[in-house]
Image (spheres, grey):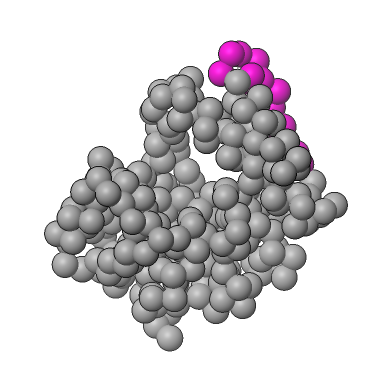
Amino acid sequence: MDEEGASVVITIKNEAKNIQKLLDSLFNNDYEHFEVVVVDDMSNDGTEGIVKKYDKVKYIRTRCSRGEGRNIGAMNSSFENILFTDGDAIVSNGWIGGMVSVLNNGFEIAIGKTVYTGKKRYIQDRVKIYFNGIEITAPSVNLAYKKRAFFSLGGFDKRFVTAEDIDLNLRAAMSGFKFGFCNECVVYAKVRDSFISFLKQAFWNGYGRAQLEEKHPGMLKKTDIRLGHNFYDFMHMSAGAAGYLLYKLR
């Protein structure tokens, strides 16, 4: 298996407004030995036509959850280093090479630095979760795995609505895989751009956390929990709690 090549896997749905910026940022990277695999969950907004303008992109159109789409992308990847990001993100120059460098220096998982952009009121601090001193809440918008480690873990759990990245990272930490960090590997991720979408995201994040707790009872140690101190913090926390309770009461 090629240890220098990288497969960038992206799962998308209706990202016509954003996907071109992401693909341009990837192909403007100064790393040459990589491919892009896009798994499209049946977009109907013109996303397909935009992606197909890029000859070097493997495009797969199929109905799937986020985790399932990433698994499909990984299964259709050519290289040992699998890098994950999202359709509404933009990667920094050097991101691909930096993540590959971490993976080729004794680590099975690479975590980059994620910078959130957009309306400041919708940017919320993540609640961090640790297992044996390892932060497992590193988001899949800026995450990479050695292919052999990824498939030995069974990939993402397709049942998860959200938090599928936390679940995978937890299983990796429990299995003893090594996590490496790259502060220079920056991905710019967009926050929600409306109050309704902000609340929906918080709701489903709470739902995913309930799924996570059910799958791994007693395994999670929560730290760095920040209490809300303004209206948006309070609404974010309330919507998340509603999603959590819905899953518990289903």
Q: Residue at x 65, y 15 (%)?
A: 229
Image height check: is 123 above or below 178? above
Image height check: is 181 above or below 227? below
Query: At which x and y percent is residue 104?
Result: 49, 72
Query: At which x and y percent is residue 141?
Result: 46, 50
Residue 232 magenta: yes
Question: In the depicted view, which residue is nearer to us: 156 or 244?
Answer: 244
Question: In the depicted view, which residue is nearer to us: 35 or 33?
Answer: 35
On-image quarter of the C terminus? top right
Residue 173 magenta: no
Furthest-front residue in this view: 250
Residue 132 position by quadrant: bottom right
Image height check: is 225 above or below 21? above
Image height check: is 142 above or below 70? above
Can residue 94 be seen here?
Answer: no
Furthest-bottom residue in this view: 1
Query: At which x and y percent is residue 86?
Result: 40, 50
Q: Residue at x 56, y 62 (%)?
A: 158
On-image quarter of the N terminus? bottom left
Furthest-right residue in this view: 218
Can residue 207 be seen here?
Answer: yes
Q: Residue at x 77, y 52 (%)?
A: 214
Q: Residue at x 60, y 63 (%)?
A: 157
Query: What stretch of residues is rendered in magenta?
Result: 222-234
Query: At which x and y percent is residue 161?
Result: 57, 50
